[in-house]
Image (cartoon, grey):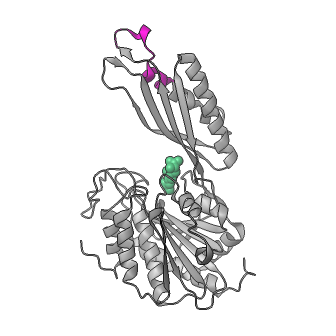
Amino acid sequence: MQTNFDNLVQIRRSFHQIPELALKEYETHALILKIIKSFPQDYLEFKNIDSMPTALLVRVRGSNPHRTIGYRCDIDALPVTENTGLKFSSTHAGIMHACGHDLHITVALGILRHFSTSQPADNLVFFFQPAEESQSGSVLAFQSGAFTQEFQPDEFYGLHDTPLLEAGTIGCRMGTLFAGTTEVNITLSGKSGHAAYPQNAQDMVVAQAYLITQLQSIVSRNVDPIEGGVLTFGKVTSGTIRNVIAGQAVIEGTIRGLTQEMIELIQERIRVICAGVALALDCKIDVQLNQGGYFPVQNNSALTKIFIKFMRNSKNIRFEETPPAMTGEDFGFLLNQFPGTMFWLGVGPTSSLHSATFNLNEQAIQPGVNAIIAFLEDRMRKEHPSNV
Ligand SMILES: CC(=O)N[C@@H](CCC[C@H](N)C(=O)O)C(=O)O
């Protein structure tokens, strides 16, 4: 497909065709760069991160800067086989932009294109971030010194698309927008053997099944139902053939909680139950819990108040206050380092994020770009630092 860099829908479709997994976003990175190089370059500066070749930071020099405003967009895709039937479906087998990061990139490029032709008052830093779905790209970038000196934001913004809001609607809330998460990897090891002689083996298929049902009592029995929490096991593997008792099994899942305390409670219960099942079923159970940068996404109260007020009072913007969601985001880590706001952009109606039939409504792109440009321009008109 030929990309017309004036047409945001076509740009989005080009990215949709080349989804790439965390830290392997090479084609995506090259296309982002090619598109930005087609914009006027007068105010732009680029920064690469040597240890993260698919990351990109672009600074737009302000005309009379009082602050540096960061805007982050994630660029990775998921190991999902697309089943949308779209003529511009993924060309990368088994990988899909099933979380809408193709739209996130497009919206960021739309905003960047605007400010590359119409110089902003304040400095802007755009962060095209690899590895949101796994491996905490935000932490890797931060630890590699991405946000030092001129690339250090005083405040940071970022969006996520959602099928739960009508296309083009902006959603946000004060306080916690997204849950914190923890990746759970559990490996069970025992003695394999002949299917006919269970007394001489330790069956890890049975242990795995037993362990999953025990672990699934955590949310119903240990979590305060008013607070809520989630424990999902999305991938289990074990065994090789019907008549061999499996000596190994692996369970992969994710914890969700709206507070760090809730995440730590669920983590602790997982450790205790795994130790108990290992003892009861005479096997080894190794538990790896990895939170990375997936902290609860806590919106800064002063900045988010300004953001919501602007969106709510703008005639051309549809805004809805949204409840917290159990989706995770490593933007939670960046909001621990810098004050800022995360918000939703509606792309509905369509099937859920992460599904093979997720087919976002492209009518969301232009209103999303317009709303964010309008907000940033308004924000830059305000004096520094009294309006925070
Ligand atoms: C918006 C979204 O869907 N984000 C992902 C973040 C994944 C966090 C981590 N890799 C985990 O699986 O816990 C999500 O699944 O919510």
Task: Tell which of 144 and 242 is nearer to you.
Answer: 144
Q: Quadrant of the C terminus?
A: bottom right
Q: Relative to 274, is 104 on the left or the right?
A: left
Q: Nearer the viewer, residue 364 or 107?
A: 107
Q: Residue at x 61, y 32 (%)?
A: 271
Residue 189 in the figure: left or right of residue 177: left
Q: Is residue 387 left or right of residue 340?
A: right
- In this view of the protein, can residue 236 be seen by the observer? yes
Q: Residue at x 57, y 40 (%)?
A: 289
Instruction: From this view, report whether residue 30 is shown above or below residue 122.
Output: above
**Residue range (magenta):** 195-210
Q: Is residue 132 above or below residue 306?
A: above
Residue at coordinates 26% horizontally, 59% vertically from top-left? 91
Horizontally, residue 93 falls left or right of residue 75, namely: left
Report x, y in % for residue 229. 61, 43
Magenta highlight: main SS: helix
Queried whether the magenta region covers residue 201, the answer comes back as yes
Q: Position of residue 281 (x, y in %)?
A: 53, 17
Residue at the far right in the pictured view: 386
Magenta stretch encompasses residue 192: no
From the viewer's side, name the closer residue of 313 and 177: 177
Quadrant for residue 67, please give it.
Answer: bottom right
Q: Visible in this render: residue 174?
A: no
Percent position of residue 299, x then y: 65, 64
In the rendered image of this protein, does residue 200 appear above or below residue 31?
Answer: above
Residue that lies at the very extreme toward the front in this rendered image: 50
The quadrant the N terminus occupies is bottom left
Count the labels in the image: 0
Q: Position of residue 85 (x, y in %)?
A: 26, 57
